[in-house]
Image: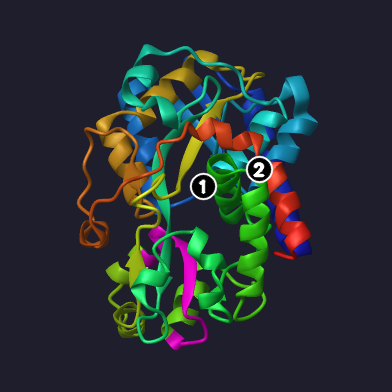
Amino acid sequence: MMKKKAAVTALFAAFGVAATTAQAADTELNIYSARHYQTDDALYGNFTKQTGIKVNRIEAKEDELLERIRNEGVNSPADVFVTVDVSRLAHADQLGIFAPVKSDVLEQRIPDNLRTERWFSFSKRARIIVYNPELVKAEHVQTYEQLADPTLKGKVCTRSGSHPYNLSLGAAMIKHNGADETVKWASGVVDNFARAPKGGDTDQIKSVAAGECGVAIANSYYLARLMNSTKPEDQAVVDKIKAVWPNQQTWGTHINVSGAGMLKNAPNKAAAVKFLEYLASDEAQAYFANGNNEWPVVTSVKVANPALDKLGDFKADSMQIGELANTVAQAQKIYDRAGYR
C-alpha cells in the first residue's frame, strides 16, 4: 500500500512539473481522471489529432484526485475532472470544484436529464436485478421494492450499502418513494440478506449463479462483461442466471453515468470546453461507451455490443440525474440506520 501511494504521489509531482511549463491555454489540456480503460487512450489521442491540443492526464482513485484538487486550490493545473457514478460527481460538485459551462453543443447533444450546468454525463449504465431461476420466481423480482419482500428472506446479496452505486440507487428510491418508504425498504433488504454485503457486483452475480444467493443487484456492464467473455467459467455463470430490468411498470430502471466537468480554477478553460464538447461527438461517444460496456448518452449514437443487444430495450428512469445529489447523504443515513453497511 505504501509503495502504491508513493507511486501515485510521484505521478502527481511529475504532472505538476509538466503543468508549470505548459504552453498557451489553447494548446494543452490537463485531465484528472478516475476512469481508465484502454479505449480512453484512443479517445484522448483522437482529440489531439482533431484539435492540436496536447492532453496531459493522471489517473487515480476519486478520493486521491479530489484531495489533490482541494490541496492545489487556485494553483491547480487541472482543467477537467472525469469520474464514474452520479454520487461521486455530486460529491465533487458539493466540494465546489466545478465551474458552470455554457455550450450550445452540450445542450443540444446531451439530454437535459443527464446534465447539470456544471457537469455532464457521457455514458450511462443501468442498475439491474439478476436472479437464479432455480431459487427465485421471476414474478418476485420485478422491482427494486420487491427486494425487501419477506418472500425473498435469506436470498438477497449485494455489495456494501456505502458503495456509491447503492447510494445512488437509494437516493433514487427516496426521490420516487419518499424517505419513510425507503427506510422500510432498506430494513427489509437487510432482513433478506443471504449473507453480509461483500465484494463487487461481479461477485454478486457469481454468488447468484452458485446458489449462495437467489437474487442480487448489479450494474449492467458487469453482466455484459461476463456475457461477452470467451472464458468457459464466465459463460457457465451467465447460463445459470437471468436478468431483469426493474420497475418497468412504474418509474423505470435506475440509471447511472460516467461524466466530467470543467474545474473552476482551470488554467485552460477554452480547451476544457472543447474537450467536453468532443466527448459529446459521435466518435467519442462510441469510444466512451465501448470502454466499459455502457450506452452513449447521445440518443442518435448507436454501438454494436452483443451483450447489450441481447439484454434488449428497457424503460429507463427519466429523473433529472442532478437531483440525486440532494438525497445521496440521506440515503447513507437511512442505510446506516437499517444496518446496511
| 241 is higher (above) or lower (below) than 168 | below
Which residue carries the number 2 mark? 328
**Which x, y percent locates residue 306?**
21, 61
Residue 275 % position (x, y): 43, 25
Q: Residue at x 36, y 70 (%)?
A: 139
Please tell me which residue lies in front, 114 or 224.
114
Quarter-wise, where is residue 329 in the image? Answer: top right
Relative horizontal placement of residue 71, taking residue 168 as reference (left or right): right
Q: Quadrant of the C terminus?
A: bottom right
Name the residue rendered at 30%, 70% in the picture.
227
Query: Which residue is identified by label 1?
Result: 35
Looking at the rendered structure, the secondary structure element under dot 1 is loop
The three-letter code of the residue at mark 1 reads Arg
What kind of element bears circle 2? Answer: helix
Specify whether 86 is left or right of 231: right
Residue 64 inside the magenta-drawn segment: no
**Which label sits in the foreground, 2 or 1?**
2
Residue at screen point 62% across, 49% down: 60
Magenta part of the chain: 210-223
